[in-house]
Structure formats: structure tokens, C-alpha cells
Image (cartoon, rainbow, N blue to C red):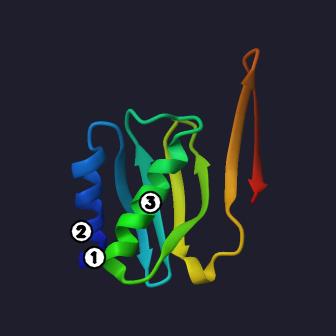
Amino acid sequence: MDCLKEAVEKFKLVFGREALVEILEYSQDKIVAWFGGNMCYTCGAVDYFDDFASMYSDCAGEEWGVESYEQNPDGTYAVVLRPKKLLRNRKRHVKIIINGEELSYFVEG
């Protein structure tokens, strides 16, 4: 858990004005994190998730990556991270709003 705390602190130091991260769940092979703040809520949001996974990897001694993420109704994100050796495909949550109508779906890749 110390490693996770170190990664959260490093993330806050680097991205604290743009993005926030809080750990919702932790086990040896899974982290569920909440991301919010003034970050880009479109194409750039996933970069913050990948950066956090990299920061955790540096400390954990093995590579971690984003397994899936979903945008919450308030614009924040729930992100699942796992060791890369356990990752098969990344699930991306895609939300499109056209003329006030929302389309929401998941894409694997």
C-alpha cells in the first residue's frame, strides 16, 4: 500500500492542478481508482490513467496498465488497473452527445 500512496502523491505533484485521483479499491492484482478534476474529459483523459499506471509501475516493480474505464454521469471516471501480464484487451467507455441525445457504449481494443 505504501507504493500506491507514493504513486498517488507523485500524481498529485505532477497533475494536481489538472486531475485528481483517489483509490476506491486495492488488491495485489487490481486497483480501482476515481479520476476527476479539470482534466480533459474527451480524448486526453486516458493519458492521465496511463500516466498513473506508469507511476505505480515504477514503484511496484512490474508493469501495470488500464484494463477498463467508464465515465460517470458527473464527468469523473472509474478506472480499473491491473498488472500488464493479466491484461488482454482494454475496454474503453465511449460517450457521444448529438443534439442533446447521449449514446454510450464500450469498445474493446
- Distance, label 3 to label 1, CA atoms, is 15 Å
The amino acid marked with disc number 1 is Cys
Residue 2 location in percent, x, y? 23, 77
Q: Nearer the viewer, mark 3 or mark 2?
A: 2
Q: What element carries label 2?
A: helix
Residue 104 location in percent, x, y? 75, 40
The amino acid marked with disc number 2 is Glu
- Distance, label 3 to label 2, CA atoms, is 14 Å
Report the residue that reaches farthest toward the top.
Answer: 99
Q: Is residue 96 above or below residue 55?
A: above
Q: Which residue is at 34% across, 37% downward? A: 18
Label 3 sits on residue: 33
- Distance, label 1 to label 2, CA atoms, is 5 Å
Label 2 sits on residue: 6
Horizontal relation, residue 18 to residue 70: left or right: left
Label 1 sits on residue: 3
The one nearer the camera, 23 or 19, is 19
Q: What element carries label 3?
A: strand
Q: Which residue is at 30% across, 45% downward? A: 15
